[in-house]
Image (cartoon, rainbow, N blue to C red):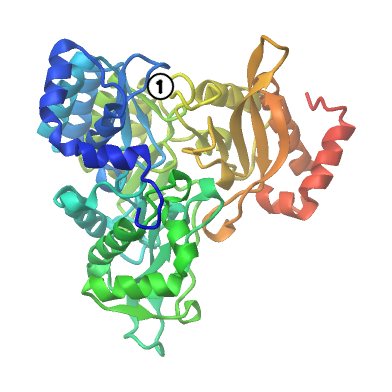
Amino acid sequence: MAAGRSLTPEERAKREKHPFDMGDEMHANAAAGRFPKGLDVFRYKFHGLFYVGPTQDAFMCRLRVPHGTLTAPQLRGVAEIAERWAGGYAHVTTRANLQLREIAAGDALRVLTALHDLGIVPRGAGADNVRNVTASPTAGIDPQELLDARPHARELHHRILGSRELYGLPRKFNVAFDGGGRVSTVVDTNDIGFAATRVRDGADVPPGVYYRILLGGVTGHGDFAADTGFVVAPADAAATAVAIVRVYLEHGDRTDRARARLKYLLADWGVAAFMARVRARAGVALHAVPAAACEPRAPIDRLGHVGVHPQRDPARRWVGVALRVGRLEAAQMRGLAAVAERDGGGEVRLTVWQNLLIPDVPAERVDAVEHALAALDLTCRPTAIRAGLVACTGNRGCKFAASDTKGHGEAIVRHLERRLTLDQPLNVHLTGCPNSCAQHYVGDIGLLGTRIAVDDETEVEGYHVLLGGGCDERQALAVELARDVPAERVPALLAWLLELHAAHRRDAGERFDAFVRRLGIREIARLLAAAAGDPA
C-alpha cells in the first residue's frame, strides 16, 4: 500500500471483519436458514464451509484429516453426519481429505459441532490458509520407508490449529511429508515438501535420515517444488514449516491474487534469500547438503495405493481400496469402519489418489476383507484404468467447473475397460477449471474442462487434452495435444491413444509418459489427424 498499490477485496474483507470473529452472524444465519452473502461467503471458508451456489443452493464442508488418517469411530461419525445433514455421501479429495456436500443453511453449524465432537476441526480448510497436511499413507507400516512421517504432519496440524496468526495468508498453502515409502504423496506439487532422505557419510552433517526441503510447488501455475539444498532433522520439520509460513505471511503479495502463491515470492527473492529469512527465524538447525550427498529415493509403486501389500510386520497387509471417482456413500463408510475394526487396526487412511487404505490386516483375514469390500460394492483389485483415475468435484457441485468431471470420469473408465486391458499403471486426471484441483498437469493424460460453442445459442461440455505429465521421479508437466474435444468423444480418443502406445512403444516396459516424450506431441497429433480426426 505504501507503494501505491491496493489490497484485494479478500484482503480488505479479512481486515474489516476477521473470519474467526463472526460467530454471532453464523448463528443468526443458521437460525434463519440463510446462506452468507457477499464477502461473508469468503469468510465462511475459514470455518470449512463453502456456499456453492448457484451450482447447488447448499454448503460444502471440507474437513481437516491430518495425514489422511481416520479412526473407525470417526469414519462412522462422518457417515452419520452425511446422512443427517448432508447428501448422504462424502468425496475423498486430492489432499487425502473428505468433503461433505448438500448441507442446508440451517444445518451448517450442526455439521461443524458434530465434527468437533468427533475430534475433526475444519478450521482453515478453505480460503487463505494452510490446507490439510498430507503424509505418506503407509507411514509406520511400509517396509521401505525411511521414517514415519505421521508425528511431524500431526505436529504441524496442531500448531496451525492453535496459532491464530498462521491464518489469513496471502493465498492457500499446501504442505506434504514423504517418508520414502512405496506410495507417493506427490510432495513436489506442494508449497512445502518434506522429502525423507538418507545423508551419506562425508557430508557436513552426521549421516542419517533427514527431511530434504522443497519449496514453491504449484503445478496449476506450471511449477514443481524446487530443492532448496537444505535438510532438517525430522523433529524440527514442523518448526521449520511454521517459519516458512510466517515469512510468506509477512511478505507474500496481497495486491494481486494471481501472484499471491509462494512460488512468486521465491521468484522475486530467489530461494537463497528466502531461506536466509527462514533460517533467521526458525530457531532450529537447517543444513546445506548437496543432493549428491544423499542416497536416491527408493522406488515408488504407482499401484501401491490399491491392492494387497505386505507391511513391515510380515504377518500383516495393507489393503488399498479403489473408489468410484473418489465417492463414498454413508453405508460404505459404515461398512469400511466395521472392516477396519474387525479385520484391521481400527483405522482407515485416505490417499491423495482419492482412495483409501485399510492397514494392519492379518494375512489370513485378507480374503474376508475382499468379500466384505465386494458386499459394499468396492474392490481392492481394480483395473489400472480405475486405479489411476482422479477427478475433481466438477460442475455438479462447483461453480468454477466447466464440465462434469466425475460423470465423465466414470464414462471414460467404462469405455476403456470394455475396449482394452492395460499392462502398466496409468494416471488420467480430470479437472473442471484452471485451478486444477485434480492436478491435470501431472497426469499421463490430463483433461481440463471447457465449454465448447456449437452455435450462437448452444454450448457443450468438453476438454483440452494434455499428455505426458508426471511427478516424483517422472516429474514433467503435461503438454497440450488437442483443444475443445467434446466430452462424448474423449473416451474414444483416450482409447486410441492407449492403443497407439501399445502398438508403437519401444518395448513392454516403456511407460506412456516416456512414450509421449519420445514420439513427441507433434507426431502424435499427426497420427491423430491421419485417423481423420475420429479415433473411434
| Location of the C terminus (image quadrant) | top right
> Percent x, y for residue 109?
16, 23
Residue nearest the viewer, comparing 449 with 322: 449
- Which picture quadrant has residue 415? top right
Drawn side of residue 177 relative to residue 292, left or right: left
x and y percentages locating residue 408 in the rendered image = 57, 23
Q: Residue at x 31, y 32 (%)?
A: 42
Question: Badge 1 local density, few (<14 within 10 Å), some, or many (20+)?
Answer: few
Q: Report whether 240 appears left or right of 441.
A: left
Q: Position of residue 475 (x, y in %)?
A: 57, 57
The answer to whether 499 appears left or right of 400 in the picture is right
Q: Name the residue at 39% across, 60% down.
A: 193
| Any part of residue 390 in sight | yes
Residue highlighted by disc 1: 377
> Does the rendering let one see residue 124?
no
Q: Does 37 sit above or below residue 318?
A: above
Q: Secondary structure at mark 1?
A: loop
Q: Across the whole image, how many numbered discs are drawn on residues?
A: 1
Q: Quadrant of residue 143?
A: bottom left
Residue at horizontal 54%, vertical 54%?
471
**Residue 411 location in percent, x, y?**
59, 21
383 to the left or right of 121 = right
Q: Residue at x 40, y 62 (%)?
A: 180
Q: Give the amino acid at mark 1.
A: Asp
- Closer to the camera, 67 or 86? 86
Q: Is residue 459 above or below residue 207?
A: above
Identify the image quadrant of residue 265. Answer: bottom left
